[in-house]
Image (cartoon, helix red, strand yellow):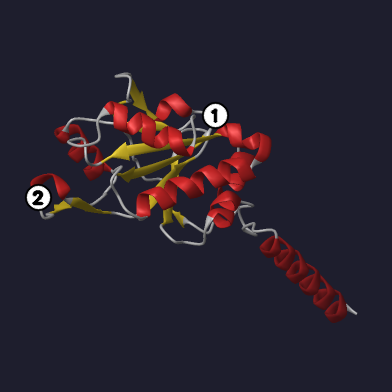
């Protein structure tokens, strides 16, 4: 009888663990699992001027999930695809979309003027924010985030492209960096699921 009771207890515990796994919860901590790379504990910060010259930092967007992307407006593929997907995610979230903040940090301040950036991010979503620092500020911020970028010469001095890290950094509503989402990591549905999990966490 004792052996049977022990077996039933073990089966019950196994079923509970399986249920937690299906819900995307850690059976030990009750925390959500993510498709993106969990970088909780990293200390990534930014303080850069927006297109109106106002200094912005991750602390400005507390209460929202913030997705930070380093790119440039003349990028032919990765940057517009990433921003378009983020706009799709915001719409897919419905009312919760108002709690999603997109932040675009240019790695090409030489060509990305305030006016160019304002038009660029506004074409994806009028609520997205673009930040443009000096070359020195840009380099320091990229280094803090461990973001790589470098000029790739073109046929003329002004036709260069920029090689850069292709991925986004996701901050939770408390302003803490939590995830690194790889470019091409699964599309807007996968990103939306991660963002929903962070919104539910507070």
Q: Is residue 130 above or below residue 154?
A: above
Instruction: Count the labels in the image.
Output: 2
**Residue wearing tag 2:** 156
Q: Is residue 6 above or below residue 98?
A: below
Percent position of residue 49, x then y: 29, 24
Percent position of residue 112, x then y: 25, 35
* Pick the front one: 101 or 115: 115
**Residue wearing tag 1:** 63
Q: Is residue 69 above or below residue 49?
A: below
Where the N terminus falls, by quadrant? bottom right
- The residue that appears at 52% across and 42% down in the rendered structure is 87
- The residue that appears at 15% across and 35% down in the rendered structure is 135
Percent position of residue 185, x then y: 46, 61
Q: Toward which corner of the image does residue 121 lie, by quadrant?
A: top left
Left-right relation of 173 to 82: right
| Distance from Cα at disc 1 to Cα at disc 2 | 45 Å
- Foreground disc of the pair 1, 2: 2
Left-right relation of 43 to 128: left
- The residue that appears at 41% across and 58% down in the rendered structure is 182
* Pick the front one: 123 or 70: 123
**Does residue 39 show up?**
no
Where the C terminus falls, by quadrant? top right
Secondary element under disc 1, as helix, strand or loop, is loop
The tag on residue 157 is none
> Which of pointers 1 and 2 lies earlier in the amino acid sequence?
1
* Pick the front one: 103 or 108: 108
Q: Toward which corner of the image does residue 10 lie, by quadrant?
A: bottom right
* Pick the front one: 201 or 49: 49
């Amino acid at each position: 009888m004792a052996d049977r009771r022990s077996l039933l207890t073990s089966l019950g515990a196994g079923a509970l663990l399986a249920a937690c796994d299906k819900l995307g919860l850690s059976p030990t901590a009750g925390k959500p699992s993510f498709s993106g790379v969990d970088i909780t504990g990293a200390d990534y910060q930014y303080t850069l001027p927006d297109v109106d010259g106002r200094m912005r930092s991750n602390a400005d967007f507390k209460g929202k999930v913030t997705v930070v992307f380093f790119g440039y407006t003349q990028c032919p593929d990765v940057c517009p695809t990433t921003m378009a997907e983020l706009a799709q995610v915001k719409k897919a979230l419905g009312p919760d979309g108002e709690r999603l903040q997109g932040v675009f940090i240019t790695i090409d301040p030489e060509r990305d003027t305030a006016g160019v950036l304002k038009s660029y991010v506004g074409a994806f979503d009028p609520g997205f924010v673009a930040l443009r620092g000096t070359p020195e500020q840009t380099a320091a911020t990229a280094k803090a985030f461990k973001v790589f970028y470098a000029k790739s010469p073109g046929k003329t001095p002004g036709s260069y492209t920029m090689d850069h890290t292709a991925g986004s950094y996701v901050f939770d509503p408390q302003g803490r960096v939590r995830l690194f989402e790889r470019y091409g990591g699964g599309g807007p549905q996968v990103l939306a699921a991660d963002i929903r999990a962070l919104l539910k966490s507070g």
